[in-house]
């Protein structure tokens, strides 16, 4: 009987270790936002140790007709975002919980960062239209 019980616990432990990745917290999708030309976007939200009851947007996901075409990681979070230039670009605010925020413009097809502005203390009067649109979208 003891041998069967030991075997049971060993098998259970092996199964738990094998499924470890599925036992970890899976990110939650935010509401999907429709864009031009069959684009849609959403964020993947997860908790952090200091705020276990809250979810934070770590990754921006862009898809076309249900197929993911781009994932953009925040620095560390993606706070606010919008499609720009008829859907060929995406603008987003990225930064930590406190004391910093960048406004970023990225090309959707390549993922390449096209521009970046410090937008923590507000934008200058001569800031580009995409950054102003992003700031006013909050």
Image (spheres, rainbow, N blue to C red):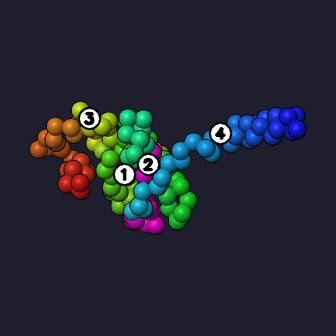
Quadrant of the rendering where the C terminus is positioned: bottom left
Residue 4 in the image: state x and y as whole percent: 87, 39
Residue 127 sits in quarter: top left
C-alpha span from label 4 to label 3 = 32 Å
Q: Is residue 38 magenta?
A: yes
Q: How far apart are marks 2 and 4 (CA)?
A: 20 Å
Q: How far apart are marks 1 and 3 (CA)?
A: 23 Å
- The magenta region covers 34-46
Q: Which of marks 2 and 3 is nearer the N terminus?
A: 2
Tell me which residue sits at (40%, 45%) in the image: 53
- What's the distance in space between the residues labelled 2 and 1, CA to CA? 18 Å
Where does the image place residue 81, in percent across and percent down from the top left?
33, 52
Residue 17 rendering spot, x and y as whole percentages: 70, 36
- From the viewer's perspective, tell me whether residue 113 is left or right of residue 21: left
Mark 1 residue element: strand
Q: In this view, does 65 lie to the left or right of 92?
A: right
Q: Residue 45 carries which label?
A: 2
To which residue does mark 3 refer? 98
Q: Do the residues labelled 2 and 1 touch (CB within 8 Å)?
A: no
Can residue 58 be seen here? no
Residue bearing the label numbered 1: 90
How many numbered circles are shown? 4
Q: Is tag 1's residue or tag 4's residue first in the polypeptide sequence?
A: 4
Q: Give the label, 2 or 1, closer to the camera.
A: 2
In what quadrant of the picture does the N terminus appear?
Answer: top right
> Who's the residue at 85% across and 34% down the image?
2
The residue tagged 4 is 20
Q: Is residue 27 magenta?
A: no
| Nearer to us in this view, 75 or 114 | 75
Residue closest to the eye, 34 or 48 = 48
Does 100 sit above or below residue 40?
Answer: above
Say few, some or many: other residues with alpha carbon within 10 Å of mark 1 (under 14 / 14 to 19 / 20 or more).
Answer: many
């Amino acid at each position: 009987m003891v041998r069967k019980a030991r075997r049971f616990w060993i098998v259970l432990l092996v199964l738990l270790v094998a499924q470890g990745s599925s036992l970890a917290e899976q990110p939650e999708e935010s509401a999907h936002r429709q864009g031009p030309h069959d684009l849609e976007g959403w964020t993947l939200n997860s908790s952090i140790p200091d705020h276990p009851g809250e979810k934070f947007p770590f990754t921006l996901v862009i898809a076309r007709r249900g197929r993911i075409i781009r994932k953009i990681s925040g620095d560390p979070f993606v706070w606010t975002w919008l499609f720009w230039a008829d859907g060929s670009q995406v603008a987003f605010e990225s930064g930590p919980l406190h004391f910093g925020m960048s406004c970023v413009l990225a090309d959707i097809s390549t993922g390449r960062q096209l521009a970046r502005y410090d937008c923590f203390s507000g934008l200058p009067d001569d800031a580009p239209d995409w950054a102003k649109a992003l700031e006013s979208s909050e």
